[in-house]
Every structure is written in structure tokens, then in C-alpha cells.
Amino acid sequence: MTRLNEVMDKQPRLLSSKLFQKHRQVEVVLSRSVLYWKEIEKSRKRSSCTSRESETAHSHAVQVCEIVAVHKSEEDDQGDTKRGRLKKAKQQSQLYPHTFTVSYVRRTRQHQWRCSDVSFHCASQALCQQWIQVINEQLSLLTNRPKRLLVYINPYGGKQQGKRIYEQKVAPLFRRACISADVIVTECANHARDHLKTEANLDKYDGVVCVGGDGMFSEIVHGLVTRTQTDHGVDQSRADAELVPCSLRIGIIPAGSTDCICFGTVGTNDPVTSALHIIVGDSQPMDVCSVHHGDVFLRYSVSLLGYGFYGDVLTDSERKRWLGPARYDLSGVKTFLSHNYYEGTVSYLPTADGLGNPRDKVQCRSGCHICQHKHSSKDKQWEMSEEEEKSDKDRWSTIHGKFIAINAASMSCACPRSPKGLSPSAHLADGTTDLILVRKCSRLDFFRHLLRHTNKDDQFDHSFVEVHRVRTFRFQPFQKQLVSREDPSEPPKKKGFSPMCSGQTTCNYSKAHSSWSCDGEILKHAAIQVSVQCQLIRLFARGIEEQQKQ
Ligand SMILES: CCCCCCCCCCCCC/C=C/[C@@H](O)[C@H](COP(=O)(O)O)NC(=O)CCCCCCCCCCCCCCC
Ligand SMILES: Nc1ncnc2c1ncn2[C@@H]1O[C@H](COP(=O)(O)OP(=O)(O)O)[C@@H](O)[C@H]1O
Ligand SMILES: [Ca+2]
């Protein structure tokens, strides 16, 4: 007996019937967790089983929690049109004229999900209705599924396809799953953020969906987090404020240029896959970094905070928005060639030993045990004692140096450009960020380091790269006092800042400071302090699933 049969035998059957599927008689069984069907007459062909639990040649099973919908259908839309079978099909459709169709999640390659249909033919209308009713009853027990969504579309993100992607690929699936959606196509930057902050009646919704890229997602996060703090009387401008986690989950339909938040939480940037994760009501907590300049709150960050290389790439790429996603590649090459480095001081509080480190090769995957043992920033029981806080003060480390890049990745930042990301072992919801320091090095060495983001080699295995898992860090750019020019052959020094030689062969006196790129937005200040807010938000995602053996 197969394992599947054993599982089915242990589960109480809610309904079991002999029905027809694709002109073959099948035994269909519904338990609380599984819909299972097995061919009764032997067929010469082996069925191709692609749904996750299907195991035997002639049986299929779908988890109830991965059923999208069930509905009555007029015709067998998977009809077999081969001539020899046509007659049999006609006879069968006369004997079994009542059809219901189950739409369910089918896994395809590389973490992509598709919605598949299977139709069953019944002899009587009553039986057909009974099947639809019992399946719907089971679906209604899945309380984590959203029913009403608020959708924001950025029509100008990525290749400007947001509206089309939503209307053609996502809306039909939401309709099939009986999800109602109020759609707002944004008219300007910060439209979605400000609407969420003050106007939106959030009580009406079970979640917010963002159609766009990482920048658009950042808008939604800012709107939702700010609204939640306002509603709870929390002053988010204070760096030590204890932020309240957002109750509404956020779904991302990828339609941007990098889409690393979608890619890193789902495993692919595919709109249909994301829509299905929303429909089945997945939930993935995520850390959010709060960024302050002194007492002034600047922004939140979920993916990459990058100073130096990525800050310069972003600054340059903003002038090339019309190029779409390719702007990053062009600006990337340009920034690489200018080979700037920046002096400053980084101080950080490393996580306690035993909580994993960025080079341990333990990747954050669906059901990650490291993230599961963490807690939301609100959870009192995990707060630090006074002694622990005091000893924290002694644990701060400080590094002064010349850096090509300072990156804080609070998630892997995997994206199509770099499928393993900036920090392949960073966790989505562990309350930490991976601080990557790339010191001044030759162009060739930096190129080697960049290249390792695209292959299997360890990008941290260079003498000029160090990486620390931290809960909080600070950065202070180097500010040198104005020095009188004694040697007239020297180039003039910029007031207040030290010019720096950029690399071994060329010099760049143009600027002493870079900017921080914060999830694709440029920060106004270079001196910042950053704290990770553990599990402040939740996404309609489940983390990247381990690739199953077919
Ligand atoms: C030699 C090839 C090296 C490829 C290295 C690729 C590393 C890519 C890491 C990407 C991390 C992305 C982190 C996410 C950031 C996003 O929040 C943010 C906003 O996204 P949105 O526009 O969707 O709203 N996106 C970004 O900041 C984009 C960063 C993209 C950087 C591309 C850098 C390309 C570097 C190419 C150097 C080539 C050197 C060639 C020398 C001949
Ligand atoms: N209607 C709009 N017009 C102009 N900018 C917008 C609009 N809606 C959103 N934005 C802004 O566009 C920026 C980029 O959006 P995003 O969807 O992330 O695309 P991309 O990935 O191409 O950068 C974000 O900063 C967002 O605030
Ligand atoms: Ca993290």
C-alpha cells in the first residue's frame, strides 16, 4: 500500500464517491485535509502527477489548504477529443451530466505555482451540489484566507506593466477565489503611503496588496507601520520606541525593477505565484529596520541599506528611470568603473553567540527554525534585562576605515540579478541584519567580489570583506577639519570634508560622502543609526520552499 493510501485511510472521510474524470472512473475522497482521487479502471497510460502530494501512478491528491475554489461547470472543459473516445465521452456525459471543477495550486519549476483545474462528473445534480458544498465548507474553515483586499498599483514601476499584470493575471484568480478587491492605481509617488497613513478604512480589509517593485512595497510598509503606530499612540520618531506590529498582511505582486522582497520571500518573481500565496492566506513575518539620524526618524528598510557602491548606483540610476530595470546595470557598470571609496566609522552590536552567523550557510527557508524561535518586537517576555542591556554597551565594536561599500541586508536580497543575494544566509524574521563591510581594494578584487554574487563561491571569503550579524549599528562619515593648502601643486580640498583617492590608479575629488540607498530610496543623511524591529510586518508568503524531489 502506498504512503498516500495509508494517510488517506487514517483520515476520517467526509465524502467519498465514484465519479468520472476525463472519461475514466475514479474514486474521489475528501478528508479534512486532503482531496484524493484514484482511477478505478486500469488505464494503459500513467497519469502525470504534478501536484505536491501525488505519489502513485493513478492517484492524485491535493491538500485542502491549497484548493483555490470549487464551482459548478457546464461542460467538461478538459474533454478528450480523440475520435475513438468521442463516442464514449458522449455516452458518459449523458450518464454523468453534472460537473464540478476544483481549482488548486500546482507546483512547477523554480518555486513557481500555477492554478490547475480538475473536473469531476456526477450522475446526479444532488451529488454534484453535495461535493461543492462539502468542499466549500472545508474551505470556509480556513480562517487565514483573505476575503477583502486593498490593492495599490504603481503603473510606472519596472517595465510599466503593473496595471496589465494585475488585470490579466491576478484579478481573474482573485475573482475565482471569491476575493473582493478595491483597487487604487496610484497617481504620484507616496499616494499609496499617504492614503494608508490617514484615509484608508483598514477595518474593511484582510490585507493590502502592492503591485510594483521594492520602492512601492516600501511605500506600503511606511503607510501601514505609521498608521499602526498612530492608532496605538506610539511615537515612531523616537529611536527607542517599541513599535507595534501591523495586523494586516501585505501581498506583493512583482512588477518592479529588482523585486528582491518578493523573490526572497517566495523564491520567484512571478505574479501568478504571488497571487496564489495571497489566496491560500500564507503568512511570513518579516523584520523591518528603523533608520534614524540623531533624533530624526528617516525611513524603514526591509531589504538593502547600502552606502558607497549601492548608494552611488541608485543615485546615478534615478536619472535614468526611463531606461526601466536596465538602469541599474548601466549605473552599476559606471559606478564600478569610478571605483570610489568612502571613509567613516561603523559601530555595531553583534548578536549573541549561538544565534547563527552570516557565513554558517544555514539558509532561511519555509518554516525556518531560527525565525520561528524569534518573537515580535512587542513580545514582553523577550525583553532584555537591565544587566543584559548594560553588558550590551560593552559589546559594541567600532571599525574606522575606507570602504567601497557598507551594506546592511536584513534579508538575503536574492533577486534575478543575484539568485543567492547579498547575504545568502540572512534570515527574514530573526531580528537581525547582516552588516557587510567591503574595504578599499583594487578594481579587480572588487569585481571578483561582485562576480561571486552570481555564482556559488562565497562572496565573503576575501581579505577585504567582513560580515557581522547585528541587531543595531551606526555609521558616521569621516569629517576632516579644513586644512590650509601648503603645497600649491595639490588639488584644492573641499571645505569640511577630506577628498579621497579612489583606488590605486585614479583619484576622485568630487565627493567625500556617498548616500545611503534604503530599499531603493536615497536617504538625506549619511550619519545614521539603524535598529532591527523583529517581525514588525507580515507578508502573504511562506518563505522559500525546499525544492521537492519529483
Ligand atoms: C559582475 C556582475 C555583478 C553582479 C552583482 C549583482 C549584485 C546584485 C545585488 C542586488 C541586491 C539588490 C537589493 C535590493 C535593492 C532594492 O531594494 C532596490 C530598489 O528596487 P526597485 O527598483 O525594484 O524598487 N534596488 C536596487 O538598489 C538595485 C541594485 C542593483 C545593483 C546592480 C549592480 C550591478 C553591478 C554591475 C557591475 C558590473 C561590473 C562590470 C565591469 C565590467
Ligand atoms: N503613480 C506614480 N507616479 C510616479 N511614481 C510613483 C507612482 N506610484 C508609485 N511611485 C513611486 O515609484 C517608485 C518606484 O516604484 P517601484 O514600483 O518600486 O518600481 P521600480 O522597481 O521600477 O523602482 C517608488 O518610489 C514609488 O514611490
Ligand atoms: Ca533578518
Image (cartoon, helix red, strand yellow):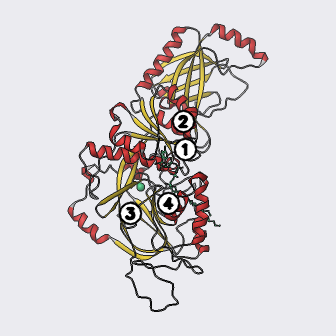
Quadrant where the C terminus sits is top right
Write down the residue under mark 3: 470
Q: Are marks 2 and 1 in contact (CB under 8 Å)?
A: yes
C-alpha separation, residue under disc 3 versus residue under disc 2: 38 Å
Cα separation, mark 2 vs mark 1, equals: 9 Å
Tag 1: amino acid: Ala
Q: Earlier in the sequence, mark 4 or mark 2?
A: 2
Q: Tell me the crowding category of disc 2: few under 14, some 14 to 19, or many 20 or more residues within 10 angstroms, Cα based.
A: many
Return the disc, 3 or 4, that comes first in the chain's sequence. 4
Front-most of 529 and 427? 529
Residue 198 appears at what percent x and percent y? 32, 40
Q: CA distance from mark 3 to mark 4?
A: 13 Å
Assess whether mark 2 and mark 4 are in contact (beta carbons under 8 angstroms): no
Query: Residue 255: which disc?
Result: 1
State the CA–CA distance, disc 1 to disc 4.
23 Å
Q: Residue 230, how many percent across, how many down?
A: 27, 45
Measure the alpha-carbon separation of dots 1 and 3: 31 Å
Q: Quadrant of ligand 1?
A: bottom right
Task: Identify the mark nearer the N-term, 1 or 3.
Answer: 1
The first of marks 1 and 4 along the sequence is 1
For mark 4, what is the residue?
423
The residue to which callout 2 is attached is 166
Q: Which residue: 59% across, 56% down? A: 327
Tell us which disc is closer to us: 3 or 2: 2
Look at the numbered disc 3 and give the secondary structure of its residue. Answer: strand
Query: In terms of sequence position, does the residue under pointer 2 or pointer 1 come before the other?
Result: 2
